[in-house]
Image: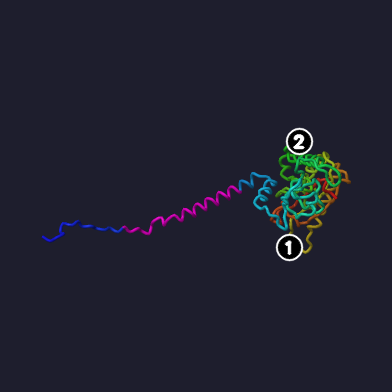
Amino acid sequence: MAVGTNAPVIIKRKKVVGGDGHHGGAWKVAYADFVTAMMAFFLLMWLLNATTEKQRKGIADYFNPTIPVNRVSGGGEGAFGGDSIFSEDTLVQQGTGATRPSPSPDRQAKGEIGSGPQVQKDDEGGSSANAEAEIQALQQVAEMLNGKSGETLLSEQIMRHIVTRLTDEGLVIELFDIEGVPLFDDRDRPTEILDELMEVIGAAFSIVRNKVSVAGHVSARPVVLVDNPVWDISTLHAQIARKMLEDIGVAPARIERVTGYADRKPAISRPMAVRNNRLELTLLRSDLRN
């Protein structure tokens, strides 16, 4: 009997890993970076929505403590935080709102009108309380015309022709054509709708004593016209509106300017749309007039 015939037989099985494995943990690192970036993005969006302009400037100064050559937010010490009482005249236009109720002539800052509850002295020695009271009066006129105060005399059909907006210049009352229902007929005479609108606007204008600006706008005409009448028509409509205001009791001295803009400032993107035929009556803010 041969030696070693009873020795155990050892079989080695080699484990082969297929090519469809998870390829290690590199993907986990990439996924974690992606989730972190998304969290930072949504945190940024939340901060932008939940903070005020002043708070956002403070956060920006915290992460950028150095003082660059051309800085908008001073970030310095003192009562004005790096700014001065003349900053509005010297700094670039930043759109963060005025620090005075009456901005500088160039109107570098055009923030919300009347913002800020504190009372500050303006260049003419008045106070922001007067400007705030004037804005509240203009808002009262707007609510009356829009029917929000329950005092409007306009019917629902007539109210479709009117829209108001409060701007840095004052309260703009826009009267416009609707398809098939114009403010002027083919001979540029006021329709009954415009007569009714003007009666209510005259009553609303009697609440305040602000100066009035009248502007006429018309839709574009075909370019094939040799003599384009848009300038004449817009100016004529503005003059008619001025005369109607004076006839219903608005003092002629309150009319600050009458302008025809032709088709140069369309209300919507389609130049020939009926919606561009409109009148804009503006109650001008007294603290912004020269």
Secondary structure beneath label 1: loop
Q: Is residue 31 magenta?
A: yes
- The residue that appears at 37% across and 59% down in the rendered structure is 19
Q: Which mark is residue 285?
A: none
Query: Can the viewer see residue 24 in this picture?
Result: yes
Mark on residue 223?
1
Q: Residue furthest left?
A: 1
Task: Find out whether residue 19 is within the magenta segment.
Answer: yes
Secondary structure of the residue carrying tag 2 is loop
Along the line of sight, the residue nearer the viewer: 177 or 108: 108
Q: Which residues are magenta?
A: 15-44
Q: Which residue is mark 2?
A: 151
Residue furthest right as drawn: 253
Q: Main secondary structure of the magenta part?
A: helix
| Among numbered discs 2 and 1, the one appearing first in the sequence | 2
Residue 59 on image: x %, y %: 66, 48
Foreground pick, 87 / 257:
87
* Quadrant (top left/top right/bottom left/bottom right) for the N terminus: bottom left
Left or right of 14? Residue 250 is right
Crowding at dot 2, Cα within 10 Å, few <14 / some 14-19 / many 20+, comes out as: few
Q: How many marks?
A: 2
Of labels 2 and 1, the one closer to you:
2
Q: Is residue 174 visible?
A: no
- Residue 278: x and y, percent? 76, 50
Q: Residue at 27%, 58% (x, y): give it.
A: 13
Q: Residue at x 46, y 56 (%)?
A: 26
Nearest the viewer among 238 and 134 is: 134
As shown in the figure, which amino acid type bears the numbered disc 1?
Val
Contact flag, marks 2 and 1 (Cβ < 8 Å): no
